[in-house]
Image (tube, rainbow, N blue to C red):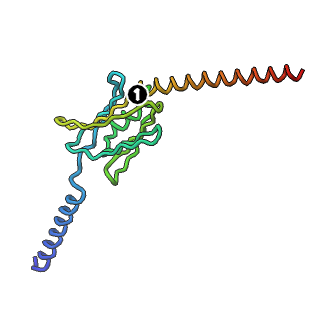
Amino acid sequence: MDKSRVLQQLNTTIKLIFAAIVALCLYGPAQANTEALVSRIGDATHLEFSGRANWKYEVNQDGLEVTLTVPELAASSQKRLMNWKDELLLSIKVKNQPELRRSQVVIRLADQFVESFDYLTDQPSRLIVDFYRDAKRAEKFLAEQKKKDQLNKKVALKKKKLAELKALQDL
């Protein structure tokens, strides 16, 4: 084998090794998919994500929709979440973003009184999001609604009496 061919092969090998190192530095090693479980614990719906030592996530709420952005979910976890429905969560949809190695979990809440609380645990490392109904806020709203309904009935009754009196005066 001549010297120039050996140098060319060595040069190509060095370029490939360098490209692999750069790719690992930029994108990191391929990680196992994140797992997710969903269950009822007491009055709360409990979402538990595992499979990461460090968690980079977001929780955003817009009206009755909560969007969790988490590391990419395993297919079995996606299916498990999308099949869940209970009195607090009407539906769960999962939108994958493979180019970013993450998933968006879009949760439709049952009503405006469902709240969420997210936290992290150590040993084992978990991301947990609990959904629960704020009973005090719901009771306060219902009491206010009842007062409004009673006031509306009184107003309607007075309007009816005024109309009757006017009808009698016209006679």
Quarter the N terminus occupies:
bottom left
Instruction: Report the residue at 51% width, 23% height from top.
Output: 143
Foreground residue among 47 and 112? 112
Residue 10 is situated, as x and y percent measured from the top left of the image, at 13, 72
Camera-side residue: 139 or 100? 139
Classify mark 1: residues with Cα within 10 Å, few (<14), some (14-19) or many (20+): few
Count of numbered circles in the view: 1
Residue reaching furthest front? 169
Seen in the image, is 118 located left or right of residue 148? Answer: left
Q: Residue at x 33, y 34 (%)?
A: 117
Can you tell which quarter of the image residue 86 is in?
A: top left
Task: Give the vertical position of 139 relative to 25 (above or below).
Answer: above
Q: Residue at x 80, y 20 (%)?
A: 165
Q: Choose top left, top right, bottom left or bottom right for residue 87.
A: top left
Secondary structure of residue under mark 1: loop
Which residue corresponds to mark 1? 134
Q: Position of residue 71 (x, y in %)?
A: 30, 45
Q: Residue furthest right?
A: 171
Q: Nearer the viewer, residue 66 or 106?
A: 66
Which amino acid type is shown beneath numbered disc 1? Answer: Asp
Please state which of residues 58 and 8 is positioned toward the viewer in this rendering. Answer: 58
Q: Is residue 28 left or right of residue 146?
A: left
Relative image position of residue 111 (x, y in whole percent): 48, 31
Which residue lies at the image location 36% right of the left edge and 28% below the top edge? 45
On the image, the x and y values in percent for residue 119 come to: 27, 37
Q: Is residue 57 above or below residue 137?
A: below
Q: Which image quadrant: the C terminus?
A: top right
Find residue 125 and report its image quarter.
Answer: top left
Q: Is residue 103 above or below residue 108?
A: below
